[in-house]
Image: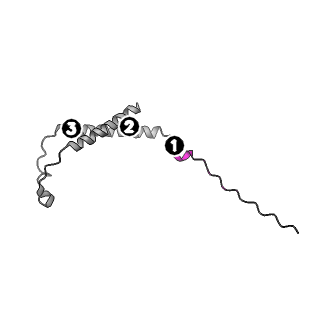
């Protein structure tokens, strides 16, 4: 089951990237780049395109699969990676030298 979620997650990631890159930017004038004013930020937004709806749906699926994978990873956790490292033993303290005999 989790393998299916991982496959869907990767597929949605790729499709989301493509959908965002295909969308055109806001129609901002060249004068806005040089300090002029543009009405694009405050003007009418217009209708939502099909590509924008697809992007919203892919974003929602991406969030759902991300949360599912995160919950699965936290529940299936086997502890810390550092727990498998063997403990180091302290070095042996050398014995005191024997007293010299005369």
Q: Quadrant of the C terminus?
A: bottom right
Secondary element at tag 3: helix
Q: Quadrant of the N terminus?
A: top left
Q: Which residue has dot 1 on it? A: 79
- Residue range corresponding to the magenta coloring: 79-92
Judge whether residue 49 is colored magenta.
Answer: no
Q: Residue at x 37, y 40 (%)?
A: 67
Q: Residue at x 43, y 37 (%)?
A: 72
Quadrant of residue 54 within the rendered picture: top left
Location of residue 11 in the rendering, given as x and y in whole percent from the top left corner: 32, 36
Location of residue 68 in the rendering, given as x and y in whole percent from the top left corner: 38, 37
Crowd band around label 3 with a 10 angstrom C-alpha radius: few (<14), some (14–19), many (20+) = few
Circles 2, 3 touching at the beta carbon (< 8 Å): no
Q: Which residue has dot 3 on it? A: 53
Furthest residue in direction right, as rendered: 102
Location of residue 87 in the rendering, given as x and y in whole percent from the top left corner: 61, 49
The mark found on residue 68 in the picture is 2
Q: Earlier in the sequence, mark 1 or mark 2?
A: 2
Q: Residue at x 25, y 41 (%)?
A: 18
Please say if 83 is above or below 72.
Answer: below
Work out whether residue 64 or residue 99 is closer to the camera in this orientation and state it: 99
Q: Earlier in the sequence, mark 2 or mark 3?
A: 3
């Amino acid at each position: 089951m989790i393998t299916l979620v991982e496959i869907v997650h990767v597929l949605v990631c790729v499709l989301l990237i493509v959908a965002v890159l295909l969308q055109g930017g806001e129609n901002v004038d060249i004068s806005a780049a040089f300090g002029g004013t543009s009405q694009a930020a405050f003007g009418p937004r217009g209708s939502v395109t099909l590509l924008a709806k697809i992007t919203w749906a892919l974003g929602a699926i991406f969030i759902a699969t991300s949360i599912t994978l995160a919950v699965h990873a936290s529940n299936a956790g086997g502890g810390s990676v550092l727990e498998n490292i063997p403990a180091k033993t302290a070095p042996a303290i050398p014995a005191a030298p024997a007293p010299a005999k005369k």
